[in-house]
Image (cartoon, coloured by chain):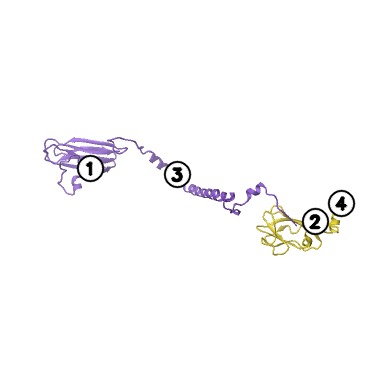
Amino acid sequence: MRVRAPGLTVKDVWDALLTGYGVVGSYAKLIEDQLDAPVSGAKADLSTLETRLSAARAGFLDNLDAAISSIPGLRQSGIPSGFENYTLTMNRTPDNDATFVTVLDITGRGILVSVGYAAPEGAQKGADLRITVDGGGAITEADFFGVTGITIEEMECGVTFMLGFASSLLVEMALAGVDTPAHSFKAVALVE
Amino acid sequence: MGALADYVKKKFGVNTRSYPVDDPVSCLTTVTEILPDNPDRLAYTHVNLGTTAQYVAWDRGVGADHGVYVAPNGGSFSLSADEDGELVGYALFGIAITSANDIFTMVTEAA
């Protein structure tokens, strides 16, 4: 009795099914586990990504990129610039007795940081404050303290805020009454 | 009578003839009778031309756990009376493992 097997050809080797080889550490097992499995998984994930990344979504991503890219880059800015991309804006305006005067009038975006006034020694009157943000209703010191008739008394450097404005800021102050010598009003804002 | 025929006659003691088996030409995934009982058969060669392995044996219990493995793509199995005795005359059964295989069988028997 003679049994003969045909010789293996190169094609036989490459055509051998990987699933028939399970010896741990063998080339076939390594190819199956380390190449075929992760590549097949990545291919499936890529297919999913390609399906989800429609032309419309790609367009939205382009818009997002453009919006982010247009934000001014971070920059080193020394004192007294304060926050990056913000300009510190200060103003001192002499009072006009009991008439409101404009201390800060800004068009744009920013943050009102503080208001105050410098009063000479012996000053008798406090200051009334009126803040208008984005063209809305004026905010007075009474809004802060909850009662009317309260004035900001003799503040140097004044009241500190973190009051954001998106389009405009108007800070007005007036002495509670006529007083001499003259006071001066101050306001500080960070403008974008 | 040629020298070959002389030699074969002396070897087997009778005149012989050889021919290809034309039925069956396929070994199925169920038990297939490849050669019937034949007391005049002196030798044969069986070839698996299919792409899957098959097993052969001399009874219908042939299977992966009962028989001789014949490799695909040209594996062959041969018997001769002078080596294998009366086994040559027994019926031969085969079974393919995965799918039916084309087979080729040549028989030498007493003329």
Q: Which residue is mark 4?
A: B3
Inter-mark Cα distance, 1 to 3: 45 Å
Image location (x, y in percent) of residue B18 = 81, 56
The chain letter under disc 1 is: A
The colour one sees for chain A in the rendered image is purple
Marked residue chain, label 3: A
The number of numbered discs placed on residues in the rendered structure image is 4
Q: Position of residue A115 (x, y in %)?
A: 21, 40
Name which quarter of the figure residue A126 lies in: top left
Residues flagged by tags 4 and 1 on a common chain: no
Q: Which numbered circle lies on residue A160?
A: 1
How many angstroms separate mark 4 from mark 1 (CA)? 125 Å
Residue depicted at x 38% and y 41%: A68
Identity of the residue drawn at 25% across and 36% down: A89
Q: Is residue A171 above or below residue A12?
A: above
Chain identifier of the residue bearing label 4 in the image = B
Residue pointed to by mark 3: A58
Which chain is represented by yellow in the image?
B
Disc ID at residue B4: none
Element at badge 4? Answer: helix
Residue hosting label 2: B19
